[in-house]
Amino acid sequence: MLTNFYRHYLLGASLLIAFLGTFSTAQAKRASKDSVSSITVVIDAGHGGHDRGGIPGQRVAEKEVTLDVAQRLKETLAANGYRVVMTRDSDVFVPLGTRVAIANSYPNAIFVSIHFNSAKRTGAAGIETYFYSRESLPLASAIHYFVAGGAPSSNRNVRRRGYYVLRKTRVPGVLVECGFLTNPTEAAHAQTSSYRQKLAEEIAAGVRGRNTVASALSTTRVATSESIPLQPYIDQTKVAKSKSHGSKRSHKKSTRRKKSSSKSGGSEAKTSSKNQEG
Ligand SMILES: [Zn+2]
């Protein structure tokens, strides 16, 4: 009798545990899938069509490498369960207003614009990530953390600037400059498919980690919208020296220093371009 009772009791308890285990796993799976699939990632491959990107005479066409990275990013994010929309998926010209309108037509979107940098000075090198609105900073920090952290290039920091596509999008938006095509080393990297694949995977890691990375960074006071001043549109392509920040560690230090970023290198992007897009 007593043994029977215990047997039933134990059976019941183990069934309950098994049920709870299954239930919570299923719940957790559903929750994570819901939060991923409710987000639309609008991927914006910079330039296209008659707009080649970069500066006149530049050997590697920016529009081609941005599209390739964008397409790889699309594959990666789709495999992670995200809904993905491309502002362009071929070599066509898409006006900036259209790119913004696409992003704004999805209420729960994030916008990721992919560019490569250029400068008359071939020594200019490194990764920089731009944001404009406060809500975009976590995404910018996370994408920059992974892209700059995984790249053999120097770290040119997270920067705040009113690029059209960042100012006009009503959803969190980031513009990442994945290196200088006018720099021989970085151009060579950008021309290999393995490097473009790596860039796509690092950007995807930033999208996935946009909340966790940002909170981790904020506890170490790396980047707040107060510590990153809005950058003016000035032609800094003639700046003689560019301090390169070789590691995440020096990135942390330099942003903590309340930032002389307008002096330390600045953007080498051709800011005189009428689109103001790097
Ligand atoms: Zn560009």
Image (tube, rainbow, N blue to C red):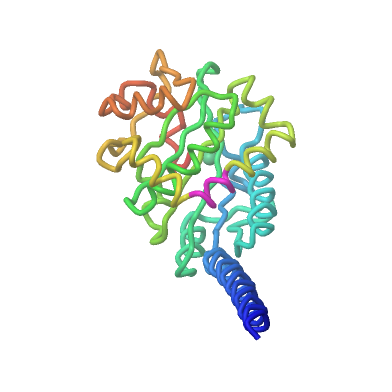
Residue farthest to the bottom, as pictured = 1
The residue at 40%/13% (across/down) is 240
Magenta stretch mostly in which secondary structure? helix
The magenta region covers 203-209
Q: Is residue 153 left or right of residue 139?
A: right
Name the foreground residue: 137 vs 47. 137
Using the image, determine if residue 118 lies above or below residue 18.
above
Residue 187 screen position, x and y as percent: 65, 26
Quadrant assignment for the N terminus: bottom right
Would you say residue 180 sits in the magenta stretch? no
Name the foreground residue: 193 vs 206. 206
Q: Quadrant of residue 265?
A: top left
Q: Is residue 248 left or right of residue 133?
A: right
Name the foreground residue: 167 vs 261. 261
Residue 56 screen position, x and y as percent: 57, 30
Would you say residue 205 sits in the magenta stretch? yes
